[in-house]
Image: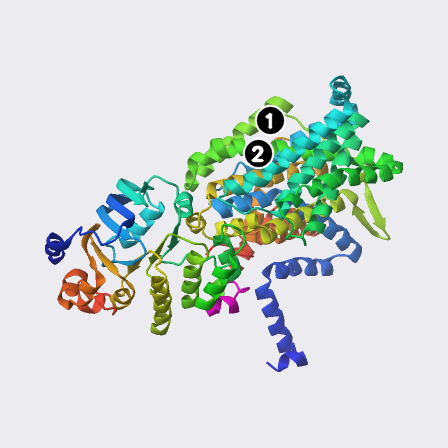
Amino acid sequence: MAAREVLKNSAFQQPPGDALLQLQGVHTNIGPYRILHGVDLAVPRGRVTALLGRNGAGKTTTLRTVMGLWRARAGRVLFDGRDISRAATAAIARAGIAYVPENMGIFKLLTVGENLRVAAREGAFDPARLAWLRELFPALGRFWDKPAGTLSGGQQQMLAIARALIEPRRLILIDEPTKGLAPAIVEQVMEVVLELRKREVSMLLVEQNFEFASTVADEVAVIDNGRIVFVERMETLRDDPSLQDQLLGLGVAARGGPEPPA
Amino acid sequence: MHGVSRLSPRAWYGRCRQLLAGHPHYALLLVVTLPALLAMPGSTWVTLTVAGLGMGTMLFVMASGMTLTFGLMSVLNLGHGALITVGAFIGATLVTGLATGHWPLPALSSLVTATGGPWLWRIGALSLGLLAAAVLHAGVFRLAGERAQGERAAAAAGSSAAGLAALATQALVAGTWASAGTALAVGVAAGLAVAAAMRGRQAGSGLAWPVPGLVAPPLAIALLAWLRPAHAFTADFGLMVPAFLAAIVLVAAVGYVFERLIIRPVYGNHLKQIMVTVGAAIIIGEIVQAIWGPGQVPMSRPDTLQGGISLGTVSIESYRLFAGLMGLLVYWGLQRLIRGTRLGLLIRAGVEDREMVQALGYRIEALFIAVFVGGAALAGLGGVMWGLYQSFVTVSLGPEMLVLIIIVIIIGGLGSITGCFYAALVVGLLNNYTIYLFPKVALFSSIGLMVLVLLWRPQGLIPTMR
């Protein structure tokens, strides 16, 4: 496989800077299926890392394993040097990792304000932070007392991201924030992520949309068949279309077009 | 849409449809009550409606715990009926025992005088109560991963526990269980009233929370002194309060053990939950029989709640009225908890998506235990209420009620307190109407109603799941 050859050349190069999150030989099964076969990944501090790969490669499983929602069968997950692979999900979250799942995990019957209030574990909002988020996502203020289920998909995604940011977090995991969104909305999400990047928020971003990922991410890792096959600075991959084809499969899919048949 | 203001029949129809679609629980209530009004004399209708509402609110008290348990953790607890039975028997023992003998009281009174006198006990009880308040306050929220410094409702409830402890001692020293019971009831009311008055002053620091507990006892003592002329009433009515409290506390404790021992090992597996909880229900039933015997245990209502009130041709059974008011109080309290507190916010979030609640840093199991124990306490309370209504209790009380409870929580929408309340009212009303109108189909009416509601709204009146 093409990806295997790339692996020989560039795999496991640690990105610059020290790692905030480190996965070492993580194996995860879902029921009888082995999804991750020894994932090694380092997420550097203060940078945006994109985790790319085709459907079923193990991107979501990687995030869920970090959150403790699925258990690693083997290997270690180090967050700031501490092994969290056996910790409860709540403890992992309290250690400072925010998670925006693929389905956004919005509480649809709760109002927008209540969704944020659940996430603010201190009970009260930090006014400066809230003001910043309201500026970042103007729709939040407008729909504050509306059930979150009545928001559009894009607004729900904004709410999901805002909910991850309402408390200071040390790392944000986002699973496919652009999935199913109209191009104009993708643009807005992109602005938000770029704003976060400017503020040096550490982020691990799972994406299918290469256009989006290559714009917002500093670092890139590619996962295939449950293993990391490529780790580089994003520029390297962005400037090399043939490498993109090789790693991400068929050009069209990699650039955010329709997905190829399985 | 101009037709709406002209109120043409079409517009009326549209308006009604819109209203009913938005509020299916009101719609169902109307659909059940209005045709009944046409089918019987007005006074009969009023009598049956009050009776039905009384039955409905009792059903609600029993069912509310089960619907939340299912909503939050998707746990099917068919042992819920057994918890109701246990509550009913505890209540029956106390009501009968206290009415006939005041049994442990003289012994306790002499214990108090022998060990340092009433004031030492009062002070001791007050500090114990305050400690309990602090533990409740810190415990519930810390367990759930909550670092917030003040939850007014829990604090108020906890600190009125302080007042209650002192009051109970006061009553113990003073003499009778009846006055103890009334003192407790008044203490709770006073604590809650002060807490409610303080709600507006959230800005106050964490130091404010013991205030209700400190204010409540003197207030309650003053009220008691004022109530003294009505002593016959308090002596009689107050008997129920220890029975209610004992059932609530003891069944909550049983619920805690039940959750740890029986529910915990079968999380996430409905089939196992059904088998294990049915098994546990059978065992609990046998234990109850071993303690109380296989027959009926009488449980007579206090004289105050015997008989009825007649207003012209309408006669209303006074116990049903009382049960209705109690049920309304429970509903109001639960709504306050669910809609107005942080614990309630977490419960609502957990009912929708428990994984996300965990991913936001809350230990959902702690939340679930709290809900389960609370639900068990309500099951116990409901058992006492139903036992008083029947005037006797048997081992089959819980299992029999369980059928109706399951119907109620399915009609209401699993996990919804509002849905559960209205479904319970409708089931209670329909039951009373059909017993009068068509006695032969009365048993079938609830199941028939469930079938119809599910055809109309497959997820129940108020769906909570996605």
Taking A33 as reference, is B257 above or below it? above
Residue A200, horizontal then vertical, whole percent: 34, 59
Residue B13, horizontal then vertical, whole percent: 62, 73
Residue A110 visible, this orientation: no
Find out whether the residues at labels 2 and 1 contact each other: C-beta distance under 8 Å. Answer: yes
Residue at numbered disc 2? B82
Residue at 66%, 61% (x, y): give it. B30
Residue at 79%, 31% (x, y): give it. B178
Which chain is disc 1 placed on? B
Residue farthest along the bottom direction in this orientation:
B2
Q: Nearer the viewer, residue B279 or B207?
A: B207
Residue type (three-letter) at the residue carrying disc 1: Val
Residue B278, horizontal then vertical, whole percent: 50, 34
Q: Are marks 2 and 1 on the same chain?
A: yes
Which chain is disc 2 placed on? B
Residue B288, numbered circle: 1
Q: Secondary structure at mark 1?
A: helix
Asked if residue A139 is among those painted magenta in the image, a careful observer would answer yes
Quadrant location of residue B161? top right
Q: Nearer the viewer, residue B409 or B366?
A: B366
Q: Secondary structure at mark 2?
A: helix
